[in-house]
Image (spheres, rainbow, N blue to C red):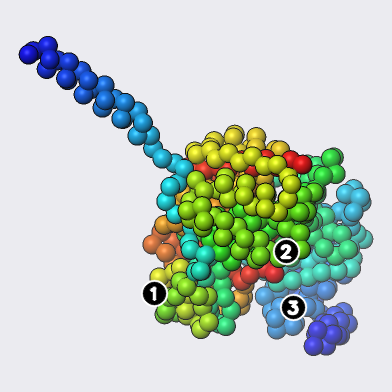
Amino acid sequence: MRRFTTMLIVMCCCVCAILPTNAVEITGADDSVVSFVRCVSHDMYYSEWENAELEYGYDLYGSDFSTKSGILYYVKSGNAIVGYVIVDRNGRNVVEFSRGKPAYDKVPQTLAASTRKYLYINGMPALLQGNEYIEINMSGKPLFSIDMVSGLSPMYSPQPQSKNCIVSAISNLMWHWSINGYSSLASGMTFVEVEEQVDGIITAEGGYANSNIPATIEKYVKAKSTYSVSVTNKPNPTFSNVKTEVASRPCLLGFAAGSPYSDTVGHMTVCVGTRTVSSTNYVSVMDGWETYVVEKAWGSYNDFMSKVVLSK
Amino acid sequence: MKTCLKRSIFWVAIVLILFSACAHKDTDNLGVTGFPSDGVHQPQIMYNDNIYYYTATGFDKALPDTFTFVGSVAEVDNSSVPSSNWNGSLVEIGQRIFADVDSNSIIYVEYTSGFAVFTLRNE
């Protein structure tokens, strides 16, 4: 079906080349790109492109971050953006087009940066912000990031929770350490099995309360390994407290009732980073809801942290 | 007698001060946090044979022009994930659902303070 559609579009382009021009206007795009957009607009799914204009969006760069790999143009109908096209470095051949928004424009606001390079590598979008290289998917969601200076990229593998959020947060923390040098913590186990074991311990300690976290983690680590662990609860942490802690290691971070997670119930997460954008503080968390690290605005609802120091 | 009364008042005051000093605000959550392990933990709704999940992006979004009212939450069960259209977990019966006929990636659900985005799970 896809091949058929592509063939139709190509045939359409050939026919359009000999037809009189319509109302597509350009602002710097090569004639061949304008011609392509004009042709595509004959497809019923792209009818909004019929009287559209092409507006330069931004340059795209390749894997060396300096060689231009393409140009992105917005397709605009009036003031509305009705799609985009990406052309190759020569500016003549369209390599990607869509009625939707470019992935770069769907990146969460929390990742906004004043200086950024848009990367287009092997047909996939990525960003370079300062020293940070971030691969994103077509929905703009970050998939992977690495500090280009240190080369360090802790492996994060957030797992969706199947049990209480404290249980899940402790399990996600154990899971994280298990793939970052402390393999005994989940050796031969699935995430659900880790959750089940943590659930059993915290239930025996008295239930899903923050005060039971230290004993639960200590007993879990002792049961699974010979590692040493120290767990310290800290109520009402400041953003600075959390920032200092996650600079060295992840910590548990609580969102009290009234946070974006819930009006009525508190939620526990694993915090793995912080960021400040336009004077607003954000925390990067594995929240048990998503399978990637998400960023949430810091607020007075962040009423709890638990420092967990592991050593061999 | 007067001296005795004064001493009593003094000691009562001391005891009260000590008690008030000890009765600090407990922020270490002696109560339960989160939902029980045997229930659903994330608000979700089944619409158009897909489950849409609330991802804590806030209850206060504005509704985009392209989204129109399509129906309301019919049944709620917080012990298991929804298996029929218009059913949900951790939402309220009657909450209004808005969808875009051209895109099925997100829906909006009305709350008292605005609209929350519910998305398909990104596997």
Kindly identify which residue carries mark 3: A41
For the point 57% across and 83% down, which residue is it? B49
> Which quadrant of the structure image shows residue B22?
top left
Q: Residue A17: horizontal and vertical position, in percent?
A: 87, 79
Give SS at disc 1. loop
Q: Is residue A251 visible?
A: yes
Which amino acid is tagged 2? Met
Q: Are marks 2 and 3 on the same chain?
A: yes
So how many labels did they put on this image? 3
Task: Locate the C terminus of chain A by quadrant.
Answer: top right
> Which quadrant of the structure image shows residue A82?
bottom right
Question: From what the image shows, is residue A262 above or below residue B123?
Answer: above
Give SS at disc 3. loop
User: Could you say which disc has been placed on residue A46 in the image?
Assistant: none
**CA gap, disc 1 to disc 3?**
43 Å
A31 or A165, nearer to the observer: A165
Q: Nearer the viewer, mark 1 or mark 3?
A: 1
Q: Residue B96: horizontal and vertical position, in percent?
A: 43, 73
A236 or A262, nearer to the observer: A236
The first of marks 2 and 3 along the sequence is: 3
Which amino acid is tagged 3? Ser
Q: Residues within 10 Å of mark 2 (few under 14, many from 20)?
A: few
Which amino acid is tagged 1? Ile
Q: Residue A249: horizontal and vertical position, in percent?
A: 70, 42
Q: Nearer the viewer, mark 2 or mark 3?
A: 2
Whether the residues at callouts 2 and 3 have beta carbons within 8 Å, the answer is no
Kindly identify which residue carries mark 1: B93
Give SS at disc 2. loop
For the point 44% across and 54% down, which residue is it? B32
User: Could you say which disc has been placed on residue A189 in the image?
Assistant: 2
Q: Residue B26: horizontal and vertical position, in percent?
A: 41, 40
